[in-house]
Structures are given as C-alpha cells and as structure tokens.
C-alpha cells in the first residue's frame, strides 16, 4: 500500500512487474482530482497515451470527455486512469499475468482518491469495458453487456461497468452511444444527488 501519491507514482514508474515495462514508451499513471467522487478506469493506454504519458489522450479520449460533459461531469468530479500502466504491444488485450502485476497499482490509486462524501455514500469506480470490469469484480458472473449501469459493491467503493468507449466508437451504433451516455448520467446522478449542496464542482 502506497502512503502518498508521490510514492505510488514513483513505484509505478520503477515497476518491472511484467514484460510490458520493457516495450512501452513510458508509464501512464493517471490524472484528475485526488478528491474526486468518481474514478473512471479504462483498460490500457492507447498509442497516444503511451506517447504523451496521459490517459485518454486520443480521439477515443475526446469522445469520452464529450460524453462525460453531456452527462454533467465537470472538472474536479473525476479521476481518470487505466487498469494497465503500460501499453501492450500493438494495443492487444493484456494477459492475465500482466493484469495481476498491475492491479495493485490501480487499487492503491482508488484507495488514495479521498472524496468528501455524504453519510452512507461511497466512491464510484466506473469500469470501461470487460477487462477493467473483470479485474475489479473478479467474481462477477455476467459480462458488461448485461451488467452495464448496475452497481457492484467492492470493499469501500462501488464499481459500475459500462462499455469501453473504443468499442462504442468502433460500433458506429447510435444505440451504444445512448447506452453509454445513460450509464455515465446515472453515475453522475448517484455521485452528485440533487439534494447535495455541500459540494461545489469547479467548471471546465
């Protein structure tokens, strides 16, 4: 367990837990508010993420941010990261041993995000796609297509799976876009109920 964000970032940078550390350009740690009520977790860095060192840097990231804005998210609401901190070669799906080597880093990130919550409220982790969902909720018996939008209690936070935005864009399906929007909107409403006036989000 990392004590501080600085310690965890240094540990991720130095990690050689799997072979991906030797093939990626750099580690992609994550970005966003450390007091966010929502953590959005993608599968793995894409090509531009690997190049620039920040998650969701490419067109898929722009699509995600647009849908987040449409759902009502503003700066300060979210911490963005990926399950994997290294890009798998040619963007392939990460292997199980690679996921296990990286999962601890993600769990420490989730733990370090410390939002101000109302009584009985929990931090929400949005899992983008099957790989992230399965890593966070390994006992889940259903796939994202069935489970999307539904909360799954894990330790002291809630996991809500939804489509991988890359899949939504590639599908060219208006239905998938609307489902993705709906899931994000429901997460936003759960994290920031209308009766909650104690939290003032910063504008983009």
Image (spheres, rainbow, N blue to C red):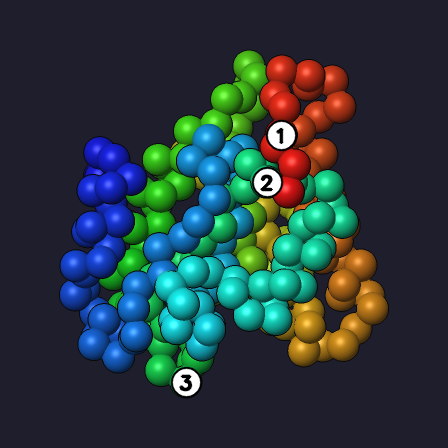
**Residue at x 63% of width, y 63% of height:** 62
The quarter of the image holding the C terminus is: top right
> Mark 2 and mark 1: span between their CA atoms?
7 Å
Mark 3, secondary structure of its residue: helix
- The reply, left or right, for residue 155 in relation to residue 98 is right
Q: What residue would you read off at disc 3?
A: 90
Q: Please, is residue 76 above or below residue 142 in the view?
A: above
- Marks 3 and 1: which is nearer the front? 1
Q: What residue would you read off at disc 2?
A: 75
* Residue density around tag 3, few if under 14, some if 14–19, many if 20 or more, within 10 Å: few
- The reply, left or right, for residue 26 in relation to residue 61 is left
Q: Please, is residue 4 above or below residue 68 in the view?
A: above
Q: Nearer the viewer, residue 16 or 152?
A: 16
**Residue at x 20% of width, y 42% of height:** 7
Tell me the tag on residue 201.
1
Labels 2 & 1 near each other (Cβ < 8 A) = yes
Task: Report if residue 6 is visible in the image.
Answer: yes
């Amino acid at each position: 367990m990392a004590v501080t964000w600085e310690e965890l970032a240094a540990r991720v940078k130095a990690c050689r837990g799997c072979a991906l550390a030797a093939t990626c350009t750099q580690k992609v740690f994550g970005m966003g508010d450390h007091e966010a009520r929502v953590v959005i977790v993608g599968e793995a860095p894409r090509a531009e993420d690997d190049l620039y060192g920040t998650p969701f840097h490419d067109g898929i990231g722009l699509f995600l941010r647009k849908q987040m804005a449409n759902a009502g998210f503003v700066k300060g609401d979210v911490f963005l990261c990926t399950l994997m901190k290294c890009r798998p070669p040619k963007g392939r799906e990460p292997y199980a041993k690679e996921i296990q080597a990286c999962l601890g880093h993600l769990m420490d990130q989730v733990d370090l995000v410390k939002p101000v919550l109302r009584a009985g409220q929990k931090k929400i982790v949005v899992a983008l796609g099957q790989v992230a969902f399965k890593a966070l909720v390994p006992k889940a018996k259903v796939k994202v297509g069935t489970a999307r939008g539904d909360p799954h209690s894990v330790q002291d936070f809630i996991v809500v799976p939804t489509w991988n935005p890359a899949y939504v864009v590639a599908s060219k399906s208006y239905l998938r876009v609307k489902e993705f929007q709906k899931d994000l909107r429901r997460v936003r409403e759960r994290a920031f109920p209308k009766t909650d006036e104690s939290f003032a989000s910063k504008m983009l």
